[in-house]
Image: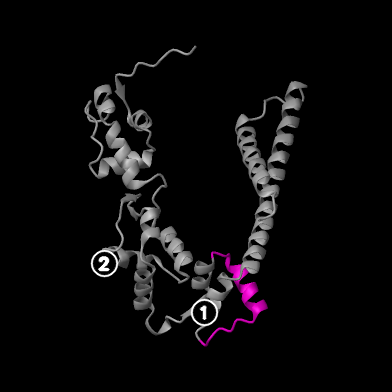
């Protein structure tokens, strides 16, 4: 039976684990003054303080949830999919300036937002902000905006726009209603999802094959050293990286190797 660890103080990782928090929850909890700062040398928490902070830890989870915050680009993409409009990063900033959305923290100097705050936004508020930015162009969208709304790769949109005969105006913009109609086409959504699954699977299989080749070559060099045909053993670094790549690729293949429902 493993020995019990008798902690008298906690570093940041141990303090977060003690409270059932992730590192981002710990950081946000500290930033918002919900969790106490370290009381030992300014960098560690005493066991008493850690135990007294359990309720504060639960408050952090209740207030900020368990899904990590996201930056402006991903926030815009999430809203674009939700309201079927070409939401941009600057729209996120306007929503913040208007008080409709709150910056919960920052990551590498950039603001981040809670996913659940984004999901709670009134769609009409988002539409108003987008319309104010676009002005007379509100009823149209360029290819980049269409990709944002649909969540497709650009090449996929270009192909389907051509196949469906979507017409671009003299500015190269498409009717927003045409793009929104693509998004509500369930059969098309399944077709695109299956196409992307197949492309991703093919890329992952190529990665798997390359890792296998690296490992086989390493084994040959190792055999050469064992047999005395090489003066130096092969470097373990490439083998370690290839094994990690192979493990990741095979895990992804197992997950991807099922057709989209």
On screen, residue 9 versus residue 79, left or right, reads: left
Q: Place residue 226 in its image quadrant.
A: top right
The disc at residue 10 is none
Q: Which residue is mark 2?
A: 98
Q: Earlier in the sequence, mark 2 or mark 1?
A: 2
User: How are the residues colored?
Assistant: one colour
Q: SS for tag 2?
A: loop
Q: Are marks 2 and 1 in contact (CB under 8 Å)?
A: no
- In magenta segment, residue 154: yes
Extreme residue in the bottom direction: 170
Q: Nearer the viewer, residue 43 or 188?
A: 188
From the top left corner, tell me how far across and down residue 115 is, in percent. Answer: 40, 54
Q: SS for tag 1?
A: helix
From the top left corner, tell me how far across and down residue 25 is, in percent. Answer: 35, 41
Q: Residues within 10 Å of mark 2 (few under 14, many from 20)?
A: few
From the top left corner, tell me how far across and down residue 213 is, in percent. Answer: 73, 40
Q: Which residue is at 34% across, 32% downward?
A: 19
Q: CA distance from mark 2 to mark 1?
A: 28 Å
Q: Place residue 100 in its image quadrant.
A: bottom left
Q: Place residue 12 in its image quadrant.
A: top left
From the top left corner, tell me how far across and down residue 255 is, in percent. Answer: 65, 46
Q: Which residue is at 37% across, 42% downward?
A: 24
Asked if residue 236 is positioned above or below residue 180 in the image, the reply reads above
* Count of labels in the image: 2
- In magenta segment, residue 19: no
Q: Which residue is at 29% across, 22% downward?
A: 9
The disc at residue 177 is 1
Bounds of the magenta segment: 151-170
On screen, residue 46 versus residue 182, left or right, reads: left
């Amino acid at each position: 039976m493993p020995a019990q660890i008798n902690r008298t103080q906690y570093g940041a990782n141990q303090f977060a684990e003690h409270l059932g928090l992730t590192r981002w929850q710990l950081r946000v909890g500290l930033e918002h003054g919900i969790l106490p700062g370290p009381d030992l040398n300014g960098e560690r928490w005493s066991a008493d303080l850690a135990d007294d902070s359990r309720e504060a830890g639960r408050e952090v989870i209740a207030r900020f949830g368990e899904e990590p915050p996201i930056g402006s680009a991903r926030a815009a993409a999430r809203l674009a999919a939700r309201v079927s409009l070409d939401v941009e990063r600057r729209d996120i900033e306007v929503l913040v300036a208007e008080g409709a959305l709150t910056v919960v923290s920052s990551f590498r100097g950039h603001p981040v937002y809670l996913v659940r705050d984004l999901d709670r936004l009134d769609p009409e508020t988002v539409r108003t902000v987008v319309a104010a930015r676009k002005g007379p162009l509100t009823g149209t969208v360029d290819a980049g905006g269409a990709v944002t709304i649909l969540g497709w790769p650009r090449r996929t949109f270009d192909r389907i726009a051509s196949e469906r005969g979507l017409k671009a105006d003299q500015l190269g913009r498409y009717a927003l209603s045409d793009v929104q109609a693509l998004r509500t086409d369930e059969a098309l959504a399944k077709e695109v999802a299956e196409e992307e699954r197949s492309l991703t699977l093919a890329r992952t299989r190529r990665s798997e094959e390359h890792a296998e080749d690296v490992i086989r070559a390493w084994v040959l060099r190792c055999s050469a050293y064992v047999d005395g045909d090489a003066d130096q053993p092969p470097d373990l670094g490439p083998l370690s990286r290839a094994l990690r790549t192979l493990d990741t690729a095979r895990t992804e293949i197992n997950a991807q190797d099922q057709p989209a429902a």
